[in-house]
Image (cartoon, rainbow, N blue to C red):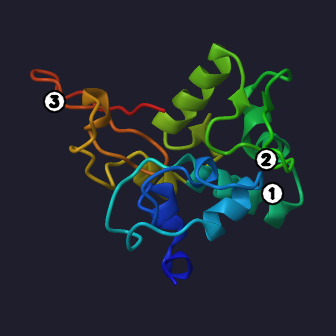
Amino acid sequence: PWCHEMTIREMLTMCTCYASTTFRRYEGDDWVESFFRVKPDHVPGTVFSYDTSSSHVLAALVEKLTGMDMLDFLRREVLDRLGFSAEAYILKDPQGVSQGGSGLMCTLRDVARAAWLCSHYGMLEGEELLPADFMRQATANQVPTDLQPVLDEQGGYGYLFWMPRSVPGREHLHGFTM
């Protein structure tokens, strides 16, 4: 029942009902199925635990709803207008679903263009490529992560964005990491 209770927001903020990536704990090779078959560890929304399978299932959802590969959809909606490289691609899982958590292969320039767009809340030359309200929420601290074992992961988490940790004397700087 905890899977049914889970929201997309909980998946975006890595507050699912799992303590770790599900497809690494699943005996089959269907990564999406693993998200719904692995026994949950806790009630969703109560614990932050970085879970690549959450991002993967969200990518699968986009592909199911649009009928397009994730990168083709992103190109059509945003990336082509950013000048994203034609050589970029996304690795697939064993079932042919785009890897939503770690599969994008692109140039450093592509990453910089995407980061620039995010830092401008989805606006490019006066055009809203991504909803500004959503981007403000996505790049804001949504979940505390101060119990993470790595110092650079203790600044909090947005919607699939790590927040920067506070550095004494630099409190006036705002930003995020991907």
Residue 159, percent from left and from top: 46, 51
| Circles 1 and 2 in contact, beta carbons < 8 Å | yes
Residue 120, percent from left and from top: 49, 36
- In space, the residues marked 2 and 3 are separated at their CA atoms by 36 Å
Depth order, front residue of 29/162: 29
Give above or below for 169 relative to 161: above
| In-image side of 47 versus 126 (left or right) | left
Residue 11, percent from left and from top: 51, 61
Give above or below for 13 relative to 148: below
Q: Secondary structure at mark 3?
A: loop
Residue drawn 64% across and 69% down? 37
The residue carrying mark 1 is 63
Q: Which label's residue is closer to the chain start, 1 or 2? A: 1
- In space, the residues marked 3 and 1 are separated at their CA atoms by 39 Å
The residue carrying mark 2 is 70
Dot 1 surroundings within 10 Å: few (below 14), some, or many (20 or more)? some
Q: Secondary structure at mark 2?
A: helix
Q: Secondary structure at mark 1?
A: helix
Residue 171, labelled with which disc? Answer: 3
Depth order, front residue of 93/136: 93
Dot 2 surroundings within 10 Å: few (below 14), some, or many (20 or more)? many
**Disc nearest the viewer among 3 and 1:** 1
Dot 3 surroundings within 10 Å: few (below 14), some, or many (20 or more)? few
Q: Amino acid at mark 2?
A: Met
Q: Amino acid at mark 3?
A: Glu
Depth order, front residue of 73/120: 73
Q: Which label's residue is closer to the chain start, 2 or 3? A: 2
| Circles 2 and 3 in contact, beta carbons < 8 Å | no
Depth order, front residue of 81/89: 89
- In space, the residues marked 1 and 2 are separated at their CA atoms by 6 Å
Residue furthest to the bottom in view is: 1
Residue 3, labelled with which disc? Answer: none
